[in-house]
Image (cartoon, rainbow, N blue to C red):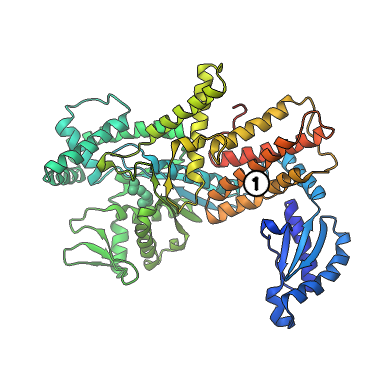
Amino acid sequence: MHPFQKFRLECERLTQQHLPGARLEVPPKEIGADLAFPCFAHAKELRQSPADIAREKVKPIVGEIMFSPLIRKVESSGPYINFYANWEMLGKLIVNDILKQKEYGKGKRKNKTVMIEYSSPNTNKPLHVGHLRNDSIGMAVSNVLDYCGYDAIRTAIINDRGIHICKSMYAYRQWGNNKKPDKKPDHFVGDFYVLFEQKLKENPDLEQRALELLRKWELGDKKTRTLWKHMSMWVLRGMKETYKRFGSKFDFWTFESDIYDKAKPIIEEGMRKRVFLKNEKGDTVAKLEPELPNKVVLRADGTSIYITQDLVLAKMRFEKYKLDKLLYVVASEQNLHFQQLFKIFALLGCSFSRKCHHLSYGLVNLPTGRMKTREGTVVDADELIAEVAGLAAAEISKREKSLPKKETAARAEAIALAAIKYYLLKPEPVKDILFDPQRSIDFEGDTGPYLQYTYARARSILRKSKKKPRLGKGHYQDKEIAVVKKLGQFPEVIGKCSAELKPHFLANYLFELATMFNEFYHTTQVIGSEREQELLALTKAFTDVLGTGLRLLGIAPLEKM
Ligand code: ARG
């Protein structure tokens, strides 16, 4: 049990002796108390005003807290009973716990498996900035779940078939002159997709040409398949490079081309159960009205559409991996898709229908407006990483003129990735983002680099001191208590992140923690202080928690910056 939990339990035990069932809350910061009990719920039963209840019930509790060393003070304030912790003692316990456990707040293995599907690109063009947000969320959520004791399986579905793929293929066949990639291969292929869209504006017939190619592909036409293989390979080779650079990791990938034609049994099951019907055109349609729009799940000619693969895939995943949960990290543009998909599972009576969750996230805009490949204004992932790395390198050179080139580049890379990931993780997933590259690398702002910088500074204190961290008496001053309190919240924050699947809680927490540490650091001399060892222990605990938190967000803590 974490120290703050011990404190909570003790306060709760005392309160419940006089107010059965009472649950304590963490009051807003301005109150200054650590826990509070609002007496409103008991007013009716006791026929007293909440303020009277608070005033009366606090009395016996006051008498008892002297046997509870973790509680410093209890008092009534209007309708509330407020508890104050003995932070000298609690603080020591927290710092001790952090220094003793290698991974503070890490959960026991739960024997529950969660699959996280994220990124899931199409193989007709390179990754864009939306994928960077997707990957940041996917990785952070996987890491946090794993830390909390779940077995996390990281996967992606590679959408490598369909009309959009055939468009790039068509353009290459017509205008590519059998050229081999002369640039990063996913960009090479992406250029043909853009070219197709351009030519389509002049010649609407091209849509038909692409469809013909798709039909040929579905029939297994040799030439078409060979071209497709080559182009898919190019794209994936390019994407793997980007994933490696960005740190996106997967346990395995599934390819749509391997599963798209395996829908027969589930389509038949749907027909049998009358969840699916044939419409007048002969398409197979899932009947979801009036709650949701009906949904075509298979075309009359037997060809699959986007949702067909998802019907097959979910079943496969649950059967093969005995999942307790399946998370889809996919942009909010597909909210309806997933509502329909999950509804279909429910109607089919699939036992896993309640175990599916769409982790939806908003758009990433850049100051120039919404990006779309078709308009040619897409913000490419590689370009964005390079741009931010350039900005970071410039900032480093300003600060440390004599740093060798190689070291500057390595640091710039780590800082750029931190900048991007943090910027994309900080807002709640549902919110849209306006990505501002310059702001993202501000060493003094609410940014990834600021966290890395604070980490590096704290680490340098530990390096410079000749003494060893030791707990000491725990006579913490105000600013130190603020840090310690915040440190003590780490396990709860991680728990909340994993329960709500929202990594922004962790991002914001780390920023507050770092800010508090900086306030302490700016006003307190650690090296040379009489309490040097105790303050070193606090500093070490801080770097441990911040380091762990950053790693969970997929951000590298830096020793030097
Ligand atoms: N490749 C799709 C896209 O780019 C996303 C796939 C999402 N995953 C899924 N199981 N449907 O829009």
* Residue 145 in the image: above or below residue 387: below
Q: Left or right: where does residue 81 sit relative to residue 389?
A: right
Q: Position of residue 461 (x, y in %)?
A: 71, 29
Disc 1: which residue? 106
**Please, what is the three-letter code of the amino acid marked with disc 1?**
Lys
Q: Residue furthest bottom?
A: 47
Q: Residues within 10 Å of mark 1 (few under 14, many from 20)?
A: some
Q: Residue at x 37, y 32 (%)?
A: 383
Viewer-nearest residue: 48 or 455: 48
Q: Quadrant of residue 17?
A: bottom right
Q: Position of residue 351 (x, y in %)?
A: 44, 63
Q: Residue at x 81, y 74 (%)?
A: 56
Viewer-nearest residue: 112 or 401: 401
Q: Quadrant of residue 369?
A: top left
Q: Secondary structure at mark 1?
A: loop
Q: Position of residue 397 (x, y in %)?
A: 52, 22
* Residue 143 in the image: above or below residue 181: below
Q: Left or right: where does residue 512 sit relative to residue 418?
A: right
Q: Left or right: where does residue 255 sit relative to residue 304?
A: right
